[in-house]
Amino acid sequence: MAGTKVIIVGQLPPPIHGQSVAIERITQIRAPEHEIISLPLNCSSDIESVGSFQIKKIFITISVAFKLLAQTFGKKDVIVYYPPASPATIPVIRDMLFFIISRIGVRRWIFHFHAGGLPEFLSTGFLGFVARLIYPRPKVCISMSKDSELTPGKFFGGEDVYIPYGLEVPLEFEARGHLQPLRLLFVGNLFISKGVEMCLRALKSLRDKGYDLHLDLLGGDVERDRDRIREIVDELGVKDFASFHGVVSGAPKWEYFKNADSFVFPSHYPAEKFPNVLIEALGAGLPVVSTQWRGIPELIGDDCEGSALVETEDQDAFEAAVEHLISSSDEVYASYRQASRKRFEEKYTLEKFNQSILAAFAKCL
């Protein structure tokens, strides 16, 4: 017999990004105490359209809001899971349109903040004032990390719960030294603010020092940064050593993780919060070089030997951290791999994530 109905509202892949993938994982949870139903809110068909204004998004939002209203109106024991917008005007207005229609039928909301910065974005100004009136008061606010002083619960109401992402890594851990040639791996949509330029410049600098180094970049390109990235590749003369593979998923993606030496992700992307790709890297046993940005320090932790976090846009520190990894002895590098894998197994397995999400559902009741 099915238990409490939980309706999962949100974007499912495609496009592939941290939020859509995480929501898809939640829709796949099965538990006897809950009947989990997916209600896709697929406003974006590709990474280019995420956060942009399109007329069709208005109709999709209204349609899904009325579908939710039909499933919840007059029903007491229904939980609605919803991922609030990223900190930008158009996504927030979409949220408000959705809530104006749907909130009258829902008693129990769970907000899951996949993007960072929304409470700060709405804390001042007219848009924030209106949002406070229109957004419903959730029972539970899920965040991935405790990096923000202005917690979602303080702003929107509800109990703050911290649940890091968790996932499956279908690779058998391999205790090994460096592979040759040395390969750096970047995975993520190709925004300059996610650190693509910094990775390319580090590649050039370290190759000039004599390292046989290659860079693999996995992810979709975006129109606003596409031409600039091509210009950087041509300017640095690294076309033969930086490979752009586009969006890669499934077994082919994990092959890149298997053959990589280190994972590079010097992001200061505005909506970054708790990047899935860093968890994938830890699970694959890769030491990480990333940034002191949003939830990343909490994700990596203080005890992940070998991995390093630098200040955002500090090119020299980033290159030094990468060089420290690729120049380490095989014995030391093997210990770095062990530390990364241990961090994953202790914190970020799919089983831990699913258990924590079910506990959040229970808090809603």
Image (cartoon, rainbow, N blue to C red):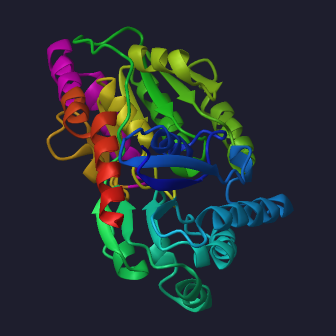
Which residue appears at 61% of the width and 71% of the height? 73
Q: Nearer the viewer, residue 357 or 77?
A: 77
Q: Main secondary structure of the magenta part?
A: helix
Residue 262 forms part of the magenta stretch: no
Which residue appears at 68% of the width and 32% of the height? 234
Q: Nearer the viewer, residue 168 or 136?
A: 136
The percent coordinates of residue 31 (x first, y second) are 37, 41
Q: Nearer the viewer, residue 48 or 360?
A: 360
Magenta residues span: 312-339
| Position of the C terminus by quadrant | bottom left
Which residue, as the protein is rendered here, is positioned at the far front? Answer: 1
Q: Is residue 211 visible?
A: no
Which residue appears at 62% of the width and 51% of the height? 39
The percent coordinates of residue 13 (x first, y second) are 63, 39
The percent coordinates of residue 269 (x first, y second) are 51, 55
The percent coordinates of residue 107 (x first, y second) are 48, 74
224 relative position to 85: left or right? right
Can you tell which quarter of the image residue 86 is in? bottom right
Q: Is residue 222 visible?
A: yes
Figure check: 330 above or below 165: above
76 relative position to 67: left or right? left
Which residue appears at 48% of the width and 63% of the height? 78
Q: Nearer the viewer, residue 218 or 119?
A: 119
Figure check: 198 above or below 134: above
Figure check: 12 above or below 268: above
| Position of the N terminus by quadrant | top left
Residue 338 forms part of the magenta stretch: yes
